[in-house]
Structure formats: structure tokens, C-alpha cells
């Protein structure tokens, strides 16, 4: 047994690719997954809530999926905004390889799957969509959000989905007290035990 997590940089488990069927942006598609990543073989409940409760993404610019896993959010962004550039960011290199494989299978050329440090430091985003990795621990999670949320363009929104019993309300309070003064935070919706938080850069 190992202490491997979906946020391990290089999963040690054997790479066993397998096919699965999923609906993205209203399309039924066949994709590839593997173990050693977050929620292989299905769109997890939180991501389903996020994708089902927020507006369409901006049609262009740089869009960010923070903690992309195998790519349900990034691929949805790319399908819905073909003229945008989608940055799929994760620390798990196996997950990034799967995003690249799945984007290629769908014919999507507007997805950049990369490690956090490979995103240009001066880049800002028209939107950020994320099912953030709550289980990395509070300090790491806070550092992650402090790094990326201030990179929203002005008048742009970030959308975060967090399970209620994993601290969504305390995270909401922390965001209100920790983000720059030109950012506002509201609870956009609640569904199936999850909160969707909207962070707006004014």
C-alpha cells in the first residue's frame, strides 16, 4: 500500500488506461481515464453541481480550470468556448496527460494542460472554474486560492464548488477576509450538499 493521493505529483500505481462514457457540454463522448487521479471514470458530484449551476463561460480570453483532474471542467470550457484558451492546471502529471489525451480525442486544440509553475506569471483570466482540492489541507488550500484568485480580470468571476460538510461556509468567511478589497464573495447556489461560491473581481 502507498500513501498516494489524487494530488500526488507522480502517482506510483500502475498506469492502466480504460475507456469510459460521459456527457460534457451536452455531448456524449468516450474518453480515457486511469487510477491515481481524482474521481476516475465519472464526473464527481461536486463538479456536476458546478457545471449545472453557473453561466456559460466567456467566449474568448484565458480561462482557468484549477485542479483539473482528468479534465471535465477544462474540456467543458473548451467545448463551450472554442475561441478561448483553456488552462488546465494540476500538480498530478498523470491527470495532465489524460487531459491532453482527451482533448486530442475531442479535437480540441485550445487546451493547455500544465503544472502550476508553467502558467505565465503575468497571465490573468476571464474566468476561473474550480472544484478545489479541499483534502490537501487548509494551509495549502488557502495558499492555492491566494495565488490564483487575484489573477482574475476586472469584472470577471471565479466559481468554486465546495462540499458543505467539508467547510464551505468557513472557506467563504476566509475568502471574504483574505482576498484583495476589490474582490467580493457570495454564495451563488446550494445543491446536493454543495455550495457554489462566486468570487468577483470588481
Image (cartoon, grey):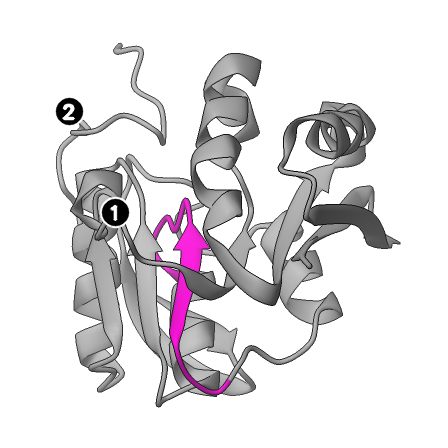
Q: Name the residue under label 1.
A: 121
Look at the picture and state if 172 lies above or below 46. Answer: above
Q: How crowded is mark 1: few (under 14 residues within 10 Å), some or many (20 or more)?
A: few
Viewer-nearest residue: 26 or 33 = 26
Viewer-nearest residue: 166 or 186 = 186
Question: Does dot 1 land on a helix, a strand or a loop?
Answer: loop
Residue 1 pos. (x, y %): 26, 10
Residue 144 pos. (x, y %): 45, 31
Viewer-nearest residue: 16 or 68 = 68
Q: Does the magenta stretch include residue 90?
A: no
Residue at x-position 29% and y-position 19%? 4
Q: Can residue 63 be seen in this view?
A: yes
Residue 64 pos. (x, y %): 41, 60
| C-beta proximity under 8 Å, tags 1 and 2 | no
Q: Mark 2 points at which residue?
A: 12
Q: Nearer the viewer, mark 1 or mark 2?
A: 1
Q: From which residue to which does the magenta span run?
A: 59-71
Q: Does the magenta stretch include residue 66?
A: yes
Please give left or right for residue 122 compared with residue 175 in the image: left
Question: Does dot 2 land on a helix, a strand or a loop?
Answer: loop
Residue 31 pos. (x, y %): 30, 70
Residue at x-position 47% and y-position 24%? 143
Amino acid at each position: 500500500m502507498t500513501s498516494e493521493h489524487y494530488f500526488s505529483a507522480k502517482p506510483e500505481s500502475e498506469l492502466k488506461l480504460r475507456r469510459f462514457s460521459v456527457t460534457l457540454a451536452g455531448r456524449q463522448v468516450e474518453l480515457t481515464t486511469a487510477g491515481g487521479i481524482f474521481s476516475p471514470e465519472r464526473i464527481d458530484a461536486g463538479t456536476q453541481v458546478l457545471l449545472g449551476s453557473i453561466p456559460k463561460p466567456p467566449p474568448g480570453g484565458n480561462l482557468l480550470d484549477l485542479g483539473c483532474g482528468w479534465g471535465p471542467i477544462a474540456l467543458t470550457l473548451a467545448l463551450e468556448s472554442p475561441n478561448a484558451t483553456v488552462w488546465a492546471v494540476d500538480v498530478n502529471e498523470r491527470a495532465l496527460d489524460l487531459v491532453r489525451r482527451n482533448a486530442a480525442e475531442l479535437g480540441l486544440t485550445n487546451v493547455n494542460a500544465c503544472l502550476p509553475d508553467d502558467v505565465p506569471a503575468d497571465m490573468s483570466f476571464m474566468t476561473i472554474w474550480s472544484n478545489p482540492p479541499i483534502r490537501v489541507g487548509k494551509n495549502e488550500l488557502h495558499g492555492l486560492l491566494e495565488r490564483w484568485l487575484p489573477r482574475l480580470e476586472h469584472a470577471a468571476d471565479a466559481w468554486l464548488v465546495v462540499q458543505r460538510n467539508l467547510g464551505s461556509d468557513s472557506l467563504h468567511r476566509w475568502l471574504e477576509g483574505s482576498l484583495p478589497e476589490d474582490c467580493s464573495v457570495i454564495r451563488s447556489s446550494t445543491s446536493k450538499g454543495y455550495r457554489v461560491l462566486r468570487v468577483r473581481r470588481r
